[in-house]
Amino acid sequence: MTLTVLFAAGQDLFNDYHVPLANALKDNAPEAVLVTEAAPETVDYIIYAPSSVLQDFTPYTRCKAVLNLWAGVEKIVGNPTLTQPLCRMVDPALTQGMVEYVSGHALRHHLGMDAHIHARPGDWNPVDPPLAQDRSIAILGLGALGQAVAKALSAFGFQMHGWARGPKSVPGMTCHHGPTGLTDCLSRAEILVTLLPLTPDTENLLDTRALAILPEGAALINPGRGGLVDDTALIAALDSGHISHATLDVFRTEPLPADHPFWAHPRVTVTPHIAATTRPHTAAQVIAQNIARSEMGQPLLNLVDRSRGY
């Protein structure tokens, strides 16, 4: 029986994904046919991006799953017409990209590299940075990405702390949970990394109060979600010097508007949402293998829990 797989993520992305998906489906689910248009009642699976023009899932009565191309699902999970199972993207290449981004910027802040990169004649101030074993890094969010980043950073010898909503156990890391645990974790974060999903519970989690808990001179790395951070509170903390620097890869509005104060702030590094991009060749394998699992009666991988929002 032929399976109709609708690519509903836009033509630009289809240009990138067409060949990798066709090859991955041929290897994993040869009965699947990849299309960009189809009668809704004939569609078995939908490959999706939140920017899609498809917003009403009601007519897709035969659809067995919606397979999101991104790790984040906050822009789709609340859609009341979406009754089909929703899977988020968990891709080894995406995870590796995040590990490399966070590790690079954590080491940059740890070693004080900016001062040397921007040094001028006469700027001879040989201050030895601490060793990793003398520096504490905290990660908010201990899912697949947070645990992978923790593993990489703990290999350098950093004192690792992590926070999640519920109890977690991660090798090489002191784990905290709940409201009291969040305070304990933040108070130890000389470098803070945010890798939480964006939900009603996590929006503006890093507000004036939370930022004030961080040690004086802490650095922030946010490759998670822009809405985790109160922009106004962060700018105030940077202006006061309480936060020494913020490296930000995600924003409430993207691209970041040209008049946003982050662009001109001397203690902010803006990167254009590059920390963990979905790469077509590896993501195509994840999607095709999930379709194959579903057709064999196995549980879908990376299924979103609607009650938690991710």
Image: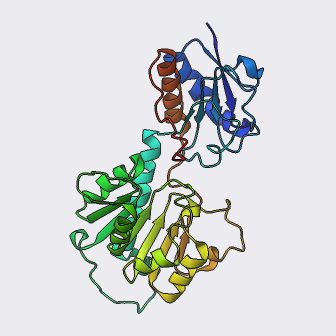
Quadrant where the image shows the N terminus: top right
Dividing the picture into quadrants, the one containing residue 133 is bottom left
Residue extending furthest toward the bottom:
122
Horizontal side of residue 285 vs 153, given as left or right: right
The x, y position of residue 290, in whole percent, is: 50, 26
Q: Is residue 127 above or below residue 158?
A: below
Dividing the picture into quadrants, the one containing residue 195 is bottom left
Dividing the picture into quadrants, the one containing residue 93 is top left
The x, y position of residue 26, in whole percent, is: 54, 16
Q: Which residue occupies the foreground of this view, 210 or 194?
A: 210
Q: Is residue 284 above or below residue 224?
A: above
Q: Which residue occupies the foreground of this view, 179 or 278?
A: 179
* Residue depicted at 44% across the width and 77% down the height: 114
The x, y position of residue 201, in whole percent, is: 53, 59
* Residue depicted at 55% across the width and 81% down the height: 266
Horizontal side of residue 34 vs 204, given as left or right: right
Horizontal side of residue 206 vs 43, given as left or right: left
* Residue depicted at 66% across the width and 35% down the height: 82
Horizontal side of residue 37 vs 49, given as left or right: right
Q: Tag count in the figure?
A: 0
Q: Is residue 300 above or below residue 247?
A: above
The x, y position of residue 238, in whole percent, is: 51, 82
Residue extending furthest toward the top:
1
Please say which color scheme the image uses. Answer: rainbow
